Image: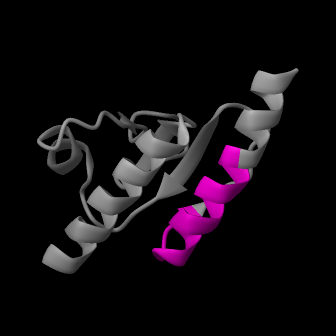
Amino acid sequence: RRTRAVIHEERAWLRERLTKLGLQVFPSQANYLLFYSPLPLKDALLERGILVRDCSNYRGLDAGWYRIAVRRHEENQTLLSALSALRKEA
């Protein structure tokens, strides 16, 4: 029960922060989020040690769609910092 509560809170927090970065984020009840970014992220984030799922091969999606797991708060902060930096570099 505690794990579900933590994921619920962290998912909402992460979705809000991703949206503030200008990303289109779909609501979710699972422990992951699907979002769209106009910037290519997979390789840039991998260079920073962050793995995201490229969803461009999902039926109905194309380049720019990604899926991320809702992780511990510190890990989610690391992801957000990396996304913010990539956005500034673009």
Judge from the rendering whether residue 53 lies leftward or rightward of residue 2; answer left or right: left
Q: At which x and y percent is residue 36? A: 47, 59
Tell me if I can see residue 47 in this picture.
yes
Q: Residue at x 43, y 38 (%)?
A: 55
Tell me if I can see residue 62 in this picture.
no
- Is 41 drawn above or below residue 6 in the view shown? below
Q: At which x and y percent is residue 38? A: 34, 68
For residue 88, which quarter of the picture?
Answer: bottom left
Q: Residue at x 53, y 35 (%)?
A: 72
Judge from the rendering whether residue 13 lies leftward or rightward of residue 9; answer left or right: left
Q: Nearer the viewer, residue 69 or 7?
A: 7
Q: Residue at x 24, y 57 (%)?
A: 40
Q: Nearer the viewer, residue 14 or 29?
A: 14
Q: Is residue 22 magenta?
A: yes
Q: Residue at x 27, y 57 (%)?
A: 82
Classified by dominant secondary structure, the portion drawn in magenta counts as helix
Judge from the rendering whether residue 81 lies leftward or rightward of residue 27; answer left or right: left
Q: At which x and y percent is residue 90? A: 16, 76
Q: How is the image coloured?
A: one colour
Q: Where are the magenta residues, as a range? A: 10-24
The N terminus sits in image quarter = top right
- Is 41 drawn above or below residue 58 in the view shown? below
Q: At which x and y percent is residue 42? A: 25, 44
Q: Is residue 4 magenta?
A: no
- Is 31 drawn above or below residue 76 in the view shown? above
Report the number of numbered marks: 0
